[in-house]
Image: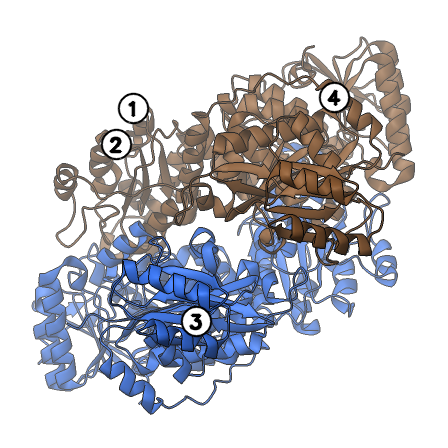
Chain colours: A brown, B blue
Amino acid sequence: MLNPLRTIMAPASIAIVGASNNATKMGTLQCLNLIHSGFGGDILPVHPKEKTVLGKTAYPSIEKLPYAPELAVLVVPTGLVPGMLEHFGHIGTRFAVIITAGFKETGPKGRALEEEVNRIARKYGIRFLGPNCLGIINTWLPLNMTVTPVADLKGALSLASQSGTYVAQTLPYLHRHGIALSKAISVGNEANIDIVDCLEYLGDDEDTKAIGLYIEGIRRASRFLEVARAVSRKKPIVAQYVGGTEAGARSGSSHTGAMAGPDYVYEGLFQQAGIIRVDTIEEVYKIGWALASQPPLKGKRIAILTNSGGPGTAMAMTCNKHGLEVPEFSEAVQAKVAKHIPGHASPRNPVDLTFHVEMGSITRDIPTVLMQAPEIDGLIIHGIMDTGFFHVIFPLIKDMVGVPQEDFMKMVRLDLEPLTAMPGTYGKPLMISSFFDHNDHAVQTFHAHGVPVFDSPEKAARAMGALYAYHRRSGMPVTQDEPLDVPPKARKQVQSTAVFDEYSAKQLLRAYGIPTVREALAHSLEEALEAAVHIGYPVVLKVCDPAIQHKTEQGLVKLDIEDNQALMKAFRSLRRKVPRAPILVAQMLTGEKEFMAGVNSYPGFPPCVLFGLGGVFTEALKDFSIRLAPLSRHDARDMMEAITARALLGAYRGMPAVDVDAMADLLIALGTLALHFPEIAEIDLNPIIVVDGAPKVADALIVKRASE
Amino acid sequence: MLNPLRTIMAPASIAIVGASNNATKMGTLQCLNLIHSGFGGDILPVHPKEKTVLGKTAYPSIEKLPYAPELAVLVVPTGLVPGMLEHFGHIGTRFAVIITAGFKETGPKGRALEEEVNRIARKYGIRFLGPNCLGIINTWLPLNMTVTPVADLKGALSLASQSGTYVAQTLPYLHRHGIALSKAISVGNEANIDIVDCLEYLGDDEDTKAIGLYIEGIRRASRFLEVARAVSRKKPIVAQYVGGTEAGARSGSSHTGAMAGPDYVYEGLFQQAGIIRVDTIEEVYKIGWALASQPPLKGKRIAILTNSGGPGTAMAMTCNKHGLEVPEFSEAVQAKVAKHIPGHASPRNPVDLTFHVEMGSITRDIPTVLMQAPEIDGLIIHGIMDTGFFHVIFPLIKDMVGVPQEDFMKMVRLDLEPLTAMPGTYGKPLMISSFFDHNDHAVQTFHAHGVPVFDSPEKAARAMGALYAYHRRSGMPVTQDEPLDVPPKARKQVQSTAVFDEYSAKQLLRAYGIPTVREALAHSLEEALEAAVHIGYPVVLKVCDPAIQHKTEQGLVKLDIEDNQALMKAFRSLRRKVPRAPILVAQMLTGEKEFMAGVNSYPGFPPCVLFGLGGVFTEALKDFSIRLAPLSRHDARDMMEAITARALLGAYRGMPAVDVDAMADLLIALGTLALHFPEIAEIDLNPIIVVDGAPKVADALIVKRASE
């Protein structure tokens, strides 16, 4: 099925209802932008009274339109939306953008109205954006129906946002920062088309080089993952997620009715999808722009060139923090650099020219050396002083220079064309840091040539770090194992078990090949003795009753039973406390490393697999990672690497390394199991004891969903 | 002794050597700024040839100056500095700013020259800033000797920086962001006056409301801590530290010869000093400005008011991340807010007015309600649309409004005086988030009235978080326990012990009241048996020889010895492996919680005390905190709270809570011990086993410094 955004983003004709000749109305502003953006197709305003709206022939009603426009845009009072959509459906329009707010985000009444809109859309096969959105921008058509004019056409960065502000009110901000958009989509309440559709569309769009997302909550997490994983192999995706705290979730839900989840679930999702996560909308834009405008970074070795030690040091530190190296140059490169620096400056890396008004070395000579050097993968420059600097000092020196300010400014303008050509010529990214703004000639030149400029040194280095994150990610495999069929035994067991006890839980795990301790269920002392001998001492005895919680604290677990005599004593002690429940006899494992794995459920998400440090520390350290099922082998390895205590996976203080393939098998199987049985709400395997490197589940909890 | 900066920052007269009538020279630019900044004292240029420099009478040599100026400024070739300083010393000048670079930061030759300068300064009692600095700014005098003009006078934020750029080249940037400085000091190589002197001076300066620091390395860490701790109780300090990575340290040392240390040591220092640490220079400025310009935040309850859900949600999430609450308003406040919002907007918190051109509610009505509400401690607003917005849309609507752009802009200008007065009136901080810049009338108005404006919603929330961090910090006690005298036994022991073994290490600990396991040293089986009976079984046997490493891996530790028979067997086994070394017989403790504590040494720092998770996990988790000795009781408690696994300190999974007072005693004593004996380079107590809440050191390593 064709992505509906292919038509919505490039319609042949647009009808707009809600525009008038009153400039204070939002619909009017949007129609004005539509007209002035240079859109080449028909624009058909619908207005009950006016003959013309904003110079365009207006039609008194939808029915009176001369033909069915490809796209309908509604900026009307909430109550009118369903009827109008019905009219458009009736005349044959199949795509719409519903700007109007007041739906799901406002409560039950609005929710009902949104359902009514959905019903009508389904009836006519209408696909629509919104409601409660701010429209779309396609600078390649061009087409802009937001409230704010767009200044830069045919850019490389595309946006999809759950906040309209971020694709409309920020347009002047983007222009001042030299960021040129390709496409921008405000998704609003996502009643029909959602951010996943946007991602898919932008992934296929040839004029989109990088994608920025603003996310308050994702409804179709599995599909999002699938699409994002595929798209992120073709082009970088940057995303901000803001729903992960109490206030964030509450605010988001009252804004677009978004369904937020804990921050760590989205962290896992983004990792798995190959999405570069950022913390601010500024980073969505600026890091997105760096990714969209620059050649990919092919290694981690960054050269830093400045006229001041402070910015150089801050950039070096930030590079290191993001996994980049700022290596000392080879002697050969140092010798070449040294030719262009003042006596007391450093040719190592960072190169610090110190305060230096002659600009040729920083804008041309040294960049050429560094871009040509095979030992360097990318370049950051701080300290180019152009008209911005001279504008500030002109009042001081005007008597000495003896020419008018305007002429002087022309004289000091730098020739930066050679520098701006370097990323293309050498295939290496260039980032500029400057405390001057868009009024500075150098900054303007970089903007005009698509070289990203950052107003703080650390931001330039941070952006380079994002290019590196994309580089590392893009080389990684995404193969998914063939999905396992449901083991027949497992199906039978899950269907027949209302409440899993520890024993039955591990039985189910074993059906999926998950290694557990050897164990048996005993209903009598005799059975227990027999089981212990069969399993081999030492063993553990545990009361096996899912209704009893905190068994350890209640003395219902007996550890380290070494022989028949001790077993008898322990068994009788348990029987005194719990007369009837069966007793689990299990192999007593001792391993110094303990991990945990599990499955959690979140609304809108497939089962989420957890991995972390196990045993007594799980709660205290909260050191775990999360991925959405199904897990690829790479996901499983990656989530093991993601915990802070990852060093414990390797050989550590005399303990052998963990068999990470076996652990990956376990995590993948856990995801498969959870996908097979949606009735399972939660799985908790803790501890998973590692013996001679091999993980074995020592305790397991499986909880079925409360039936509704 | 009077702080030399009192004179340097407000001299009666300034001689400058290195200024000429050539506008491309740095000294000329600095002299021009000095002249044009409005400095009221005498400015005396020294120039060998010119009769006047920049309109001021010039003197052919230092000797020919009409009198000894209070301050000498040198911007001359490196080699001339010592001689000129000598001349100034000779005529009686006692304060200098040495701008000239090429000293310590360039290598051995420059280092020798810097020592020469120091020698001359000592000879005459000269105190000086630099070398390799960019000068000073005092906007209250006014006085500016940097290379860049300063636009705003009598500001509230002061800076001290180890990078000259950050107090000079960034001045136009600060002006565009509405940030007005009080004082700014570039410290350069800190050959004489250092950043500690600056902090002390700025702490006492009444016109400084907050202090921003840029740090590449601190030479006098103990004194820095002492001064910062006192200053941070009077006014907030914000600091960026950039030396904590390999490239950062290398870059810093080639820049000003700064002595960097691992990032976590500075993290500990800043925590202990009550300094708010930030990651970027932008935050030094903008968060510094928020702290300098706004009334203190007195609680954690923040109201957020926007015209768009996206920024509101992002701010809510960022507030939560920084410990702030964004509580739902009480019904009473919701009712008051509801009067001023459109139908489908939310009166809860964040308040989202949605796209709304009428500005009275966001600039006046709702802020008044929220500032007056006792349930709210601070307010953030995003979405005020003033000339910035109308400037962008004017081209669209010009035909409809029918007045020239200039007149129209006057019409749309908002009256923001009531809003800017609110922080003062209600004693609550206000932060503004806006995507418009200094060309927008609203932004200009906020700048003019000292209300901080942030160009991204998250930054406004982050700044409020910094105000909260300062609020929490300022209520904390700083009492230091009376310093303990050196226990005579301890002094004797340290002097007589060349290499500490485990037993002697714990002896020394006990002399400081640090609880250890009961133990004794045995040289024969008989002594071992006697000791075990005295200590009480179970015991541990360990070969006690500091020359032997990795004892556990070599089988030189025997655990859990339950009786005489087992002891005999274990003793003999050890004797077979190590025939001669004494055997340590120690109480066998079992506790489920294990911590570690220690002391590390870093150049320029006093002994640093560490606390963290102990046992096998120490290395893998790297979960530790660090503080500089001597520790206050608050420091000790604070560093316990600083580890990720802090939950383990409380009652946890059936284990009793740790006696944190006892643990604090241990940490304080460890710091005292290390301060008493500078010859001790390293202490490592791991594990500290907690038994019934009480910490007991089970293993200890003390390493003396290699004598030189």
Separation (CA) of disc 1 from disc 3: 70 Å
In the picture of the structure, the residue carrying the numbered disc 3 is B586
Q: Nearer the viewer, mark 2 or mark 4?
A: 4
Query: Is the Cβ of the residue at disc 1 closer than 8 Å to that at disc 3?
Result: no
User: Label 2 marks which chain's residue?
Assistant: A
In the picture of the structure, the residue carrying the numbered disc 2 is A371
Mark 2 residue type: Met
Per the image, label 2 sits on a secondary structure element best described as helix
User: Label 1 marks which chain's residue?
Assistant: A
Where does the N terminus of chain B fall, quadrant-wise? bottom left
In the picture of the structure, the residue carrying the numbered disc 1 is A425
Q: Name the N-terminal-most of marks 1 and 4.
A: 1
Q: Nearer the viewer, mark 2 or mark 3?
A: 3
Mark 3 residue type: Ala
Question: Is A684 above or below relative to A74?
Answer: below
In the picture of the structure, the residue carrying the numbered disc 4 is A489
Query: Is the Cβ of the residue at disc 2 closer than 8 Å to that at disc 1?
Result: yes
Separation (CA) of disc 3 from disc 4: 54 Å
Separation (CA) of disc 1 from disc 4: 62 Å
Separation (CA) of disc 2 from disc 3: 64 Å
Q: Nearer the viewer, mark 1 or mark 4?
A: 4
User: Are labels 3 and 4 on one chain?
Assistant: no
Let me know if residue A606 appears in the view: no
